[in-house]
Image (cartoon, helix red, strand yellow):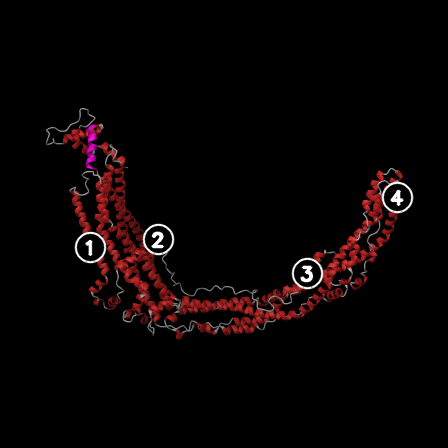
């Protein structure tokens, strides 16, 4: 079989590169990439669901308002935490002095005085204003129009608008914070039983949960036992994987060398046969070429031959070029390679591959007994782990703790329902009062809009004063609502302020700073019934602040309760003796690979023959020298074509026929003898090129392959043993990973979920967040916003009353309008009928004996009716209808 020289060189280069790798990957160093890390085991949570999700108030646009209210309360309450007062209140309530409470609540007392003044002044002013309005002495018409009226009016409208906008912002914030308190109160109340239930199981459920944790040791055991079923095959696969690059490389190089041997032998035989054929063909070609040359020279040298000079030159060159009798003989090399290749390299390599690929099954069979013993060791449970739950200290305080929390939980439920019910009442009252303030704001805005509309239309002589009058009336409505609801507003604000302010300054501020914990830790401050150390039956006093800090950091329960001398978790999680037994059994694993043979005896003889053949010593340049020479020095075809052309141009017909005949003879020579010779030269060239490029490398490559096969045959058992030991350690590491997962899970489950006091710190943190951040802050923001609306009612009343005077009809404006109407403004028949009817009911004027009448023209009113006709006309149906439509 013939192969291209480039392909042969690539195959040999690949084989050479593969056999240069002596040591397989992972044979000398630990590499556990094949087995991989231990899989994640899914342990069932043993701790009961008593964990509380941390509550955090999300940042929002109200945070600035909350901060402002807190700063305001810090100004109201400047006194520090009243430790002595609270101590007396908890231990001896009867000994609490009123002056101490008043002194501590001095800031709130000042606010109470301000509330009292507001409650006295504003309703009194409202009653006075109501009396004045009944006597038409407040909020009436402006007497006369003057130059500074526009400036005064604009200033009052701007101040009223600014005050209204401030109230609008306040009432919107009050609505939002009122709703926020209502939304947070329900979940906050429901969180109390949830927290108490979580704390109940903090101590009492620990032994049962530890027992559940110890029982889950079966999970890693089952996983290890399952993986032990395939450990032999797994180790065999790993040996196969780590050795296959080396073994496959050597087998590939053997196969490549065998193919190169076959190709080289084929080319060598082709080279020898082609050389013989070329020499035989040259012996018959030489006389024919010589005869044609002599005959052509004789014809072309005749004097009558016209234009034959160039053809004559070609005829002189018509002689043999290459002499293949000069090439070296390869008979000796062929003799040494007689019968080669004897072996079928492809079948041999395939058989060796199959033997090598069966290594995993062989390893599984050889390790079966050891795996059986390993399973017995794994099925045992460590002695230390069996005492995990039994050794946990129990004390009588656990039952008291649980019972006390249960009583608190049961007794708190009715109060929590009352809190939610009263909160609903508070929310309804807050919504009503906020709606009142919003109604005042709406009346102010409507009054301003209608008043400004009426002012802008006064220049029209036909304009009525209905819009301005309506605007003034809306302002008066807002004033009336302000006076009417000022007292309930200020009372509601002060009540919520007193509750929310003390909650913030007395509880939240000291809770956040830690003063509450310090107060509880100080001996004598708390009554004996509230002493946590006595409640739990501890031998040492428990610091609540220190316990809170330790719980916050995730400390274990026995550490916080100072039980370290009676329980050591790490001692019960020590499984070193257990793993030592597994390691001892794994050392007994063994896999034998001595039956793996990489080269058959026949293949070895073939490679030895190739190594000693001397194929590389053939003088290939001598072949190439002759191959590069042409078979004939001139082109026979071109010479034949030229002779045909000359035969057509000759004047001598006989000469032309002879030239034609000679051209035909040359063509026959080219077809019959020259072309076969040239194809043999091409065939010889292919064989020579292939052998010349491959022969110099075959001998060293053959020596390298034989040496590598011999070396690998001796080293494979050592490498396999080394890989086996490495994989055994990796397997042990992987299996120990399951047990370490269990140990890590137990440590985390016990210290962070089962026997942890973190729910206590979480409950305290959640309680502070719920009480202070989610309830107190929006509560205080609500009364703060409603309070500023309440106090801004005073400037709103003042500006509304003063502004309404400028929206009412001005006397001079009324006189001009009425005079213009009475002097010529047409009146409808309905207006005239109503006017006559009303005038007929009036008594005569004091100064006249007759009633004012109508002008002779019945469609116009006379000027004498001015003082009486205007009010009557304002009451006519057409006027009311027209102005009502205009208003809307």
Q: Residues within 10 Å of mark 4 (few under 14, many from 20)?
A: some
Gap between marks 4 and 3 measured at Cα: 60 Å
Gap between marks 1 and 2 measured at Cα: 33 Å
Mark number displayed over residue 299:
4
Image position of 298 (left or right of 521): right
Gap between marks 4 and 1 measured at Cα: 153 Å
Mark number displayed over residue 116:
1
Of label 1 and label 2, which has the lower sequence position?
2
Residue 469's spot in the image, x, y percent? 23, 39
Query: Is residue 97 shown above or below 112?
Result: below
Of label 1 and label 3, which has the lower sequence position?
3
Of label 2 and label 3, which has the lower sequence position?
3
Q: Secondary structure at mark 1?
A: helix
Q: Secondary structure at mark 2?
A: loop
Residue 730's spot in the image, x, y percent? 55, 68
Of label 4 and label 2, which has the lower sequence position?
2
Of label 4 and label 1, which has the lower sequence position?
1
Residues rendered magenta in the picture: 809-823
Along the line of sight, which residue is nearer the eye, 365 or 490?
490
Q: Quadrant of residue 264?
A: bottom right
């Amino acid at each position: 079989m013939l192969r291209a020289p480039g392909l042969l060189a690539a195959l040999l280069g690949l084989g050479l590169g593969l056999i240069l790798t002596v040591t397989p990957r992972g044979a000398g160093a630990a590499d556990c990439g094949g087995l991989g890390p231990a899989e994640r085991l899914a342990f069932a949570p043993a701790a009961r669901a008593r964990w509380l999700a941390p509550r955090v108030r999300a940042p929002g646009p109200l945070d600035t308002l909350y901060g402002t209210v807190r700063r305001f309360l810090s100004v109201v309450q400047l006194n520090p935490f009243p430790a002595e007062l609270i101590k007396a209140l908890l231990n001896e309530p009867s000994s609490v002095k009123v002056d101490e409470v008043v002194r501590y609540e001095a800031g709130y007392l000042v606010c109470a005085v301000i509330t009292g003044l507001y409650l006295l002044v504003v309703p009194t002013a409202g009653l006075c204003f109501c009396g004045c309005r009944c006597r038409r002495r407040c909020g009436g018409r402006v007497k006369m129009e003057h130059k500074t009226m526009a400036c005064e009016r604009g200033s009052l409208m701007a101040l009223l608008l600014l005050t209204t906008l401030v109230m609008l912002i306040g009432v919107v914030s009050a609505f939002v914070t009122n709703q926020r308190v209502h939304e947070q109160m329900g979940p906050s109340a429901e969180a109390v039983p949830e927290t108490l239930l979580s704390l109940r199981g903090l101590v009492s459920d620990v032994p049962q949960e530890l027992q559940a944790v110890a029982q889950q040791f079966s999970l890693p055991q089952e996983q290890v036992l399952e993986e032990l079923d395939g450990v032999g095959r797994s180790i065999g696969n790993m040996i196969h994987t780590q050795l296959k690059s080396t073994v496959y490389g050597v087998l590939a190089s053997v196969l490549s060398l065998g193919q190169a041997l076959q190709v080289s032998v084929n080319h060598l035989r082709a080279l020898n046969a082609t050389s013989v054929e070329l020499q035989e063909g040259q012996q018959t070609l030489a006389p024919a070429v010589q005869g044609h040359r002599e005959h052509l020279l004789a014809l072309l040298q005749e004097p009558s031959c016209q234009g034959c000079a160039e053809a004559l030159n070609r005829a002189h060159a018509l002689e043999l070029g290459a002499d293949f009798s000069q090439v070296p003989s390869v008979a000796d090399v062929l003799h040494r390679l007689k019968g080669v290749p004897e072996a079928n390299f492809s079948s041999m390599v395939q058989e060796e591959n199959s033997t090598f690929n069966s290594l995993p099954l062989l390893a599984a069979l050889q390790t079966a007994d050891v795996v059986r013993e390993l399973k017995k060791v794994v099925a045992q449970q460590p002695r230390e782990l069996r005492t995990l739950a039994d050794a946990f200290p129990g004390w009588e305080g656990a039952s008291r703790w649980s019972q006390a929390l249960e009583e608190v939980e049961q007794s708190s439920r009715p109060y929590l329902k009352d809190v939610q019910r009263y909160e609903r009442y508070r929310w309804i009252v807050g919504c009503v009062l906020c709606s009142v303030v919003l109604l005042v704001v709406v009346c102010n805005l409507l009054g301003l809009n209608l008043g400004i509309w009426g002012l802008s239309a006064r220049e029209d002589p036909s304009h009525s004063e209905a819009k301005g009058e309506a605007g003034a009336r809306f302002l008066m409505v807002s004033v009336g609502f302000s006076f009417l609801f000022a007292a309930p507003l200020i009372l509601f604000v002060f009540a919520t302020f007193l509750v929310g302010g003390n909650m913030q300054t007395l509880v939240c501020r000291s809770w956040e700073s830690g003063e509450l914990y310090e107060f509880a830790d100080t001996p004598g401050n708390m009554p004996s019934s509230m002493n946590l150390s006595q409640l739990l039956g501890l031998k040492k006093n428990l610091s609540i602040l220190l316990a809170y800090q330790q719980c916050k950091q995730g400390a274990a329960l026995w550490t916080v309760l100072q039980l370290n001398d009676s329980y050591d978790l790490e001692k019960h999680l020590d499984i070193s003796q257990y793993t030592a037994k597994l390691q001892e059994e794994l050392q007994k694993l063994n896999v034998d690979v001595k039956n793996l043979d990489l080269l058959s005896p026949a293949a070895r003889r073939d490679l030895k023959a190739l190594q000693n053949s001397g194929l590389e010593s053939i003088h290939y340049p001598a072949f190439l020298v002759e191959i590069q020479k042409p078979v004939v020095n001139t082109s026979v075809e071109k010479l034949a074509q030229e002779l045909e052309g000359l035969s057509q141009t000759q004047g001598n017909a006989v000469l032309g026929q002879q030239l034609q005949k000679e051209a035909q003879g040359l063509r026959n020579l080219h077809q019959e003898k020259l072309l076969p010779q040239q194809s043999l030269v091409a065939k010889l060239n292919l064989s020579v090129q292939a052998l010349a490029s491959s022969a110099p490398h075959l001998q060293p490559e053959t020596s390298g392959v034989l040496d590598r096969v011999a070396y690998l045959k001796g080293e494979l058992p050592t490498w396999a043993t080394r890989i086996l030991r490495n994989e055994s350690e990796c397997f042990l590491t992987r299996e120990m990973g399951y047990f370490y997962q269990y140990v890590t899970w137990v440590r985390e489950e016990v210290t962070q979920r089962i026997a942890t006091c973190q729910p206590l710190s979480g409950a305290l943190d959640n309680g502070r967040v719920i009480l202070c951040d989610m309830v107190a802050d929006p509560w205080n923001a609500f009364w703060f916003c409603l309070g500023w609306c309440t106090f801004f009612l005073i400037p709103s009343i003042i500006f509304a009353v003063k502004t309404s005077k400028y929206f009412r009809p001005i006397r001079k404006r009324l006189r001009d309008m009425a005079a213009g109407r009475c002097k010529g403004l047409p009146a409808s028949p309905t207006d005239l009928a109503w006017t006559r009817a009303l005038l007929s009911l009036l008594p005569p004027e004091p100064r006249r004996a007759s009633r004012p009448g109508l002008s002779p023209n019945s469609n116009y009113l006379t000027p004498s009716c001015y003082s009486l006709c205007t009010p009557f006309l304002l009451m006519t149906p057409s006027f009311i209808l027209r102005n009502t439509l205009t208003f809307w």
